[in-house]
Image: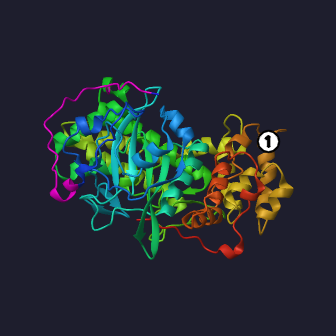
Amino acid sequence: MSVVPKSLAKDFGHRPDLVAHLAPWQSRAHIGAEKGPPMTIVFDNSYARDLPGTYLRLAPDPAPNPRLLVFNQQLADRLGLTLDGEQATRWFSGASLPPGADPIAQAYAGHQFGGFSPQLGDGRAHLLGEILAPDGQRFDLQLKGSGRTPFSRGGDGKAAIGPMLREYLISEAMAALGVPTTRSLAVVATGEDVWRDTKLPGAVLTRVAASHLRVGTFQFFAARGDKAQLKALADYAIARHDPDLLRATNPTLAFLDAVIDRQVRLIAEWMGLGFIHGVMNTDNMAISGETIDYGPCAFMEGYGPGTVFSSIDHQGRYAYANQPVILGWNLARLAETLVPLIDPDPDRAVDLASSLLDGIAGRYRNAWLALMRRKLGLAGEDAGDAALADDLMTAMVGADWTLTFHRLGTPAALRPLFEDFTAMEAWLPRWRARTGEGTGGHMAKANPAVIPRNHEVEAALTAATAGDMAPFEALLTAIREPFVEREAFMLPAPSAFGSYVTYCGT
């Protein structure tokens, strides 16, 4: 289905292109669009058009022998795309470019584990451009693992099959669970090997996002004192994500408030599912409020507030219980970049931003409590709900997070999840008294039966890397229907699986 491009809410004009074209990357410019009749992707590349100086224009590396591993037809339908397998294989591997694509590598900075890096950017990704879905919603199409860029910082710009299929799998699980997330349209094996600790088959993932604007994007220009570019970026972000705010008395302050609201609700959703992102750097916090960058992430099985999966998070900065704290920390970094735009008087700007930041903890607590009411089947609001939820957290330490909530209404099935059921046994009558005769008809829609359990994920990725996609496809089918009980995918990891460690996959 063809989509007629529409303008963004505000026309920023076409300023002269200030992008630096670096000679080592110009050699890839021979990769042109395929010739022939009009195709089914219609691009309207507003970021490249309206924000020169915020990216480098360059083409992805051509995959030598691309092979389509998985294609997300459900997502393609959502986007109004009707591609055949050959088109998807070539366009989503870098072997050729779809007509109208304008591949760029975006610039951004970021705090990584608390330390500020003034220049990061897309070191192994190429934004092909933006498309409009049939409902008019704008999406980025980005290739990940598609080759080196000037932002690669010594990396090879490539990715292996395992990490790319992992992002596809976990992002699809999050989408099925109703959590705002970037999505994966395709994974294509490139036909070349990449080296990590060992030789691995390479792959490219196609990521779909409401945008790739990050807290780190604003930090990049704030760190350089480039107020004009910062203002252009903020205007663009508001027009793209919050066009109604263009009429606000103070659009920048209203934008900060909107980003806070989206992120508060997102992290509450993560916490309710026992999801640990693993690398909540400011360059991995999207302005859109979508979960982005599925590297060292995982769903917690046995509940432990200090649970960490990332191989490099030695201090537990991004542990499960710290995610709401990092939420506030990251948003404070965004607010710092916006201060010059909020008010000409720096002191007043800081006061206005601080008034929003000071409310984050309370807003998160309210969002989390609302989520817990759904998970516990609590109708309405009661003064004792917060204590009831907090006491459950204390009682269920060590028990399987997902199955505890899923089995709350059946104590006989719940008991085997606990080494010591004493605290839980004392909690259950309080919960039943609060829910009344029923246990809440909506609980089943808030407490999944199936999540991407870590041992299943690893088994599927290991098999796929060796050439067998069947376990991956079976797991993908299960996680796309997370509220359907499939016992084979509900079982916790066997004891032999041991401690689980994830890696960023770069």
**Residue 317 at least partly seen:** no
- Residue 152: image x %, image y %? 29, 62
- In the rendered image, residue 369, in percent from the top left (x then y), is placed at 60, 44
The residue lying toward the viewer, choosing from 110 and 173, is 173
What residue is shown at x 41% (from left), y 40% (from top)? 288
Crowd band around label 1 with a 10 angstrom C-alpha radius: few (<14), some (14–19), many (20+): some
| Left or right: residue 475 compared with residue 65 | right
User: x and y percent of residue 238 in the render?
Assistant: 33, 33
Identified at 62% across, 63% down, the residue is 454
Q: How many marks?
A: 1
User: Residue sitting at 45 percent across and 30 percent down?
Assistant: 133
In magenta stretch: residue 16: yes
Q: Locate residue 409 relative to residue 208 in the image: left or right.
A: right
Q: Is residue 475 magenta?
A: no
Rendered-image quadrant of the C terminus: bottom left
| One can see residue 127 in this view | yes
Residue type, label 1: Thr
Q: In the drawing, does residue 142 fall left or right of residue 169?
A: left
Horizontal side, residue 427 vs residue 179: left or right:
right
Q: Main secondary structure of the magenta part?
A: loop
Q: Nearer the viewer, residue 328 or 137?
A: 137
- Image quadrant assignment for residue 360: top left
**Eyeballing the image, is 42 above or below 214?**
above
Circle 1 residue: 439
Image colouring: rainbow
Badge 1 marks a residue whose secondary structure is loop
Image quarter for residue 404? bottom right
Q: Which residues make up the magenta segment?
A: 2-27
